Image (cartoon, helix red, strand yellow):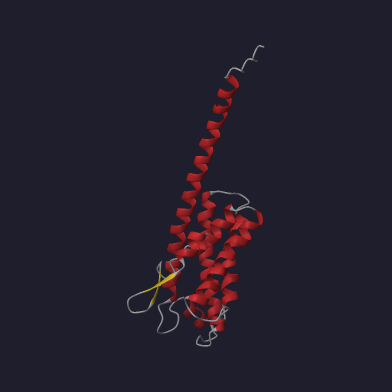
Amino acid sequence: MFVFAASRWHTVDHEGNLEPLLPYNFSAAHALLFCAAFWLPSWLGWVLPMLTIIVTDLLLNSFVYNVALFPSGSISIWMSLAIFVVLAKWLAKRRSYGRVFLGTLLGALLFYLVSNTISWIGNPAYVKSVAGWIQALTVGLPGFPPTWVFGLKSLLGTGLFTGLFAGSMKVSEAMDASEQELEPEEDEEESQSPEPTPETV
């Protein structure tokens, strides 16, 4: 969680512009939300990943972006991100690495649809029609990169970081299994060692 929080920080280039440590829309947020909720037990899987996102958002708003602490749309974005947590807890009833990748990619697509639909509803620049909704999902508004580009970057970043998190869990599980295999051998050696004889007076 601390490494993810640090990865969201921004630096200032030689022209005074803010630059994120990772490319825009290429974040570990979606993968972290899903994987943490998938593997962390009970309430930790719900609270810890969402709390990390919310706290880092507030810190960025206050110290980096210099905007209002709760800008308009923050709550709707956090609710959209909660899709990953809900999906993870639902899929975690039967755990497998296939479900991890399926869940994160499905969550990224749902987030893309939900977040751009919310933008289409709330932004007066979009025409409130089917054509305007399709515009919000594809090309976006003039003067900005197409929304499908952001969606693709988000999908690629989610897949990459999910692979890293899942690989880390696989290595951790293998290490735990090897440690459990060594413990019985140590117990056998202790049981075979002769008991000390009492001292004679």
Placement of 48 over or under 146, stated as above or below: above
Nearer to us in this view, 143 or 161: 161
Q: Is residue 47 above or below residue 195?
A: below
Tell me which corner region of the image, top left, top right, bottom left or bottom right, holds residue 161.
bottom left
Q: Quadrant of the C terminus?
A: top right
Q: In the image as oriented, which residue stretches furthest toward the top?
A: 200
* Residue 157 against residue 116 in the figure, above or below: above
Q: Residue at x 35, y 74 (%)?
A: 13
Q: Position of residue 26 (x, y in %)?
A: 43, 66
Whether 70 is drawn above or below 97: the answer is below
Q: Is residue 105 visible?
A: no
Left or right placement of residue 110 versus residue 42 in this view: left
Q: At x 44% / y 63%, what residue is drawn?
A: 157
Quadrant for residue 44, please give it.
bottom right
Q: From where the camera sits, is residue 34 visible?
A: yes
Q: In the image, residue 159 lies at what x, y percent?
A: 45, 59
- Residue 149 location, x and y as percent? 41, 72
| Place of residue 196 in the rendered image (x, y in percent of width and height, measured from the top left) | 61, 17
| Marker count (numbered) | 0
